[in-house]
Amino acid sequence: MDNTKVHPSVIMEKNQKTLKSMHQSRKDSKISPTMKVKEERYLKKLSMISEQEEKWWEVRFLFHPESGARMIWDILILAFIIYQSLSVPYFICFNDIPSDLTNGFEFLMNICFIFDILVTFNTGFYIKGTLVMNRKEIIKDYIKFWLWMDIIASMPYSWFVGSIFGGDSSSNAYNAPKVLRLMRIFRFLKVLRLLRLAKLKKILMKIEDYIASNTLANIFVFGKLLALVFFIAHWTACLWFFIGDQGSDIHPVTWITNINLQNSSVLEKYITSLYWAFTTMSTVGYGDITPFTVTEKIYAMMTMIMASGVFAFTIGSIGALVSKANAVENAYREQAVAVNRYMKRKCLPNDLQFRVRRYLDYVWENKKKNKMDEKQVLILLSEPLRDEIYSHIHGVVIKFCKIFEKFEANFISQLARTLINETFAPGDNIIEEGEMSDKMYFIMTGKVIIYHGFTKSMIQELGEKQHFGEISFFTSNPRCASVKCTDFVDVLGLTRLNFNCLVGKFPEASEILEGLIKNCEKGDFTSLDISCYLCEEIGHYATKCKLLMVNLDQEETRNKWLHERNEQNSKLVNNKDVETPKFNRKIRKIKANPRYCGRNVVGIPRENLLLSQAYPEISETPEPVVMESSTGDSVDCVRNVTVRPIYSELYLNSEESISPRGDAEGKNPREAVFRLSLIKKKLLYDPTPSVRMSKPFSRTSIIH
């Protein structure tokens, strides 16, 4: 099927042919009721097409007044107007003959001015804030006033003057004094070109509307003031020289002849005149250039009166700009000093003080850029304009959230008005894991990180036009993760209270919300379009992901680990397959060394050998002297004392045998004291008591 557009005139021609055939059939035969109906339909269709053709002609090839092409064209016309405002007084007053290049440029400029009339015929305009894009209305409005002014200002007056006087500037007739005076009179017609200066303010206001920076706005205002002063000085200088030049034909002495300026170059004449204009406008003059004729004195007085007003206006405007900037800086400085004094009085940590200063600097910079709060701007506007602004600013962020794709456009536009602007500093936690909250956030500028609260491990980084906090917002569950700012962040907050109030006004939105909540209660977060930041699967969030493996219950973790270890170590074993272990190591028998056979070793029974039998090399064996002791029924008493040889002098301390019964007087039993000495392989008995027996002998005692 062909979708090419057909011009309405072509369709109209076809319909006219069909109407002619219908009229011919009416003449040939009688008209039937069906033919009447068809004819009426065709007539209605034809009238509609004619209306469409008329509208098509009225709307087609029209320029929007705020379009970029129209803006560029206005800037070009502005440059031509500025050039004319400088060149026209100069060439009229200083009688300077323009060069061929200047004439060519003026010819091009005249063509552009004529073309500007055609462009204005096809450019829409505003009536009480309403855009009119109808060609008929545009023509009516343009013919009322601006068309005639543009025609007068666009007339090529230099061509007329040249055609009247022959156009040859080198001829003697052209340079005759009377002809020159007449030409000067006709040249004053060029002043009519300055009528375009009335459009200058309109163009400057349109350019100023596009400036959004406060610095650029101040520069633009300052530039306008300087341009105003220079234009006034330029026109004053041109007229001052023109009065002196014309007065030289009548008066013998003028300000020009007084300083011998009549034979100087045109450039020197212009600089001298401009010098007098600036000195007169700024001060009362230095006295080096003074008026002589009455006309010059009257003009000088008028210039002083006018210059005083211009000078006062200029200085006042510049002072207002400077004082306005200083007022803003002073307010910020006072606020900073007050905050610093408060923090020092409360003894806040240095790190916290630094963060507070950074936050205030950020807020202050935004305040300097915006100048007016958003609420103050929106109060000035109508309700429909507010809705459009909210939809454009906040609605763009909401459209990036796929949760709200199911909601209707009217609901989204109303939802955009409920969002609240909030600003956070670097390091601020917007939400904490485990807290209860009823907000979700949309990021306008800045970046945040989502991290696990217990392990402090980062899960994901979010940037502009992204959102977070939707799980707790729709499920009323505690926060499942924490969110921290990495830099200054501007967010839009949506509270559950505002959302529920708005949902109550839209039945379709309430049904969609109920479906979302039911799915979330079942553990299915697919309807919220939540995807895991780790495995990128839809339906669960990162803290519940299997890849994360974080268990905060230590007891549960320990029991799980023990269970897994026991399962790994336990095996099903058949008893028939179990064999007795075979030890390759032989069981050694304990053999007592004969040398140390006299020692009482625990667990090894031995016979009481004589000393001569244990040590055959000893020939003389003294009999052990044992004092009488009351052993009684003591289990630990020792009846036989085994004596073994010692290589050096040995004091054998026997243990004291204490009878449990004892004497009637409570004294200890008798003591057995002996000393054995081995000298030259002989045992000598020394009856001198050396050591007192303090403990009874036992079978487990070891004699050293």
Image (cartoon, grey):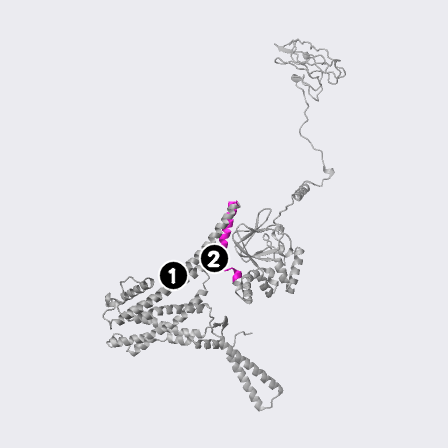
Label 2 secondary element:
helix
Q: Which residue was labeled with disc 1?
A: 315
Q: Nearer the viewer, mark 1 or mark 2?
A: 1
Q: CA distance from mark 1 to mark 2?
A: 25 Å
**160 left or right of 343 in image:** left
The region drawn magenta spans: 347-376
**How many neighbours does mark 2 have within 10 angstroms: few (below 14), some (14-19), or many (20 or more)?**
some
**Label whose residue precedes the other's in the sequence (1 or 2):** 1
What's the residue at 71%, 35% (across, down)?
A: 579
Q: Is residue 290 above or below residue 430?
A: below
Circle 2: residue type: Lys
What's the residue at 68%, 26% (across, down)?
A: 587
Disc number for residue 416: none
**509 left or right of 329 in image:** right
Q: Is residue 13 above or below residue 390?
A: below
Q: Which residue was labeled with disc 2?
A: 368
> In terms of secondary structure, what is the magenta stretch mainly?
helix
**Is residue 267 something that shows in the picture?**
yes
Q: Is residue 127 above or below residue 636?
A: below
Residue 236, x across and y down, in percent: 32, 67
Circle 1: residue type: Ile
How many numbered marks are there?
A: 2
Q: Residue furthest right?
A: 633
Magenta includes 438?
no
Quadrant for the N terminus in the image? bottom right
Quarter location, residue 441: bottom right
Residue 182, x across and y down, in percent: 28, 77
Residue 133, x across and y down, in percent: 49, 73
Residue 658, x across and y down, in percent: 72, 16
Label 1 secondary element:
helix
Quarter location, residue 557: top right
**380 left or right of 635 in image:** left
